[in-house]
Image (cartoon, rainbow, N blue to C red):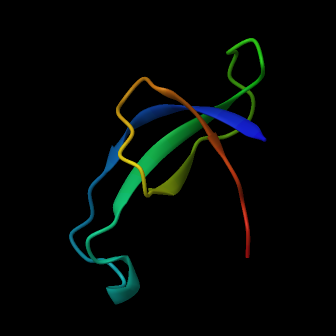
Amino acid sequence: MQLARVVGRVVSTVKQETLSGVTLQWLQPTNARGKESGKPFVAVDRVGVGQGELVYYITSR
């Protein structure tokens, strides 16, 4: 399990068709103590999180 804090929502003018209707969030990875660790990245949000919330994420190919 990897932790991150939601920095904000990503807005795009053009999206790939498969991402139509999907929310994209900007995440800042954190360690277990809540300190930043690593570079921010964009993630697909399937549950509806908000800015400032602590979330866990998975990666896959």
Residue 50: x percent and y percent? 35, 33
Residue at image point 33% right, 66% down? 22
Q: Is residue 39 above or below residue 35?
A: below
Residue 13 lies left or right of residue 22; in this view the side is left
Residue 45: x percent and y percent? 43, 54
Residue 39 lies left or right of residue 32; in this view the side is left
Residue at image point 70% right, 54% down? 58
Q: Is residue 6 above or below residue 33?
A: below
- Residue 21 occupies which quadrant of the picture? bottom left
Q: Residue furthest left?
A: 13
Residue 31: x percent and y percent? 77, 23
Number of numbered discs visible in the structure rendering: 0
- Residue 36 occupies which quadrant of the picture? top right
Q: Is residue 48 above or below residue 14?
A: above
Q: Quadrant of the N terminus?
A: top right
Residue 8 lies left or right of residue 12; in this view the side is right
Residue 12: x percent and y percent? 27, 64
Q: Residue furthest front?
A: 47
Q: Residue furthest bottom?
A: 17
Residue 43 lies left or right of residue 49; in this view the side is right
Residue at image point 52% right, 55% down? 43
Q: Is residue 33 above or below residue 19?
A: above
Q: Quadrant of the C terminus?
A: bottom right
Question: Closest to the observer: 26 or 49?
Answer: 49
Question: Closest to the observer: 34 or 1?
Answer: 1
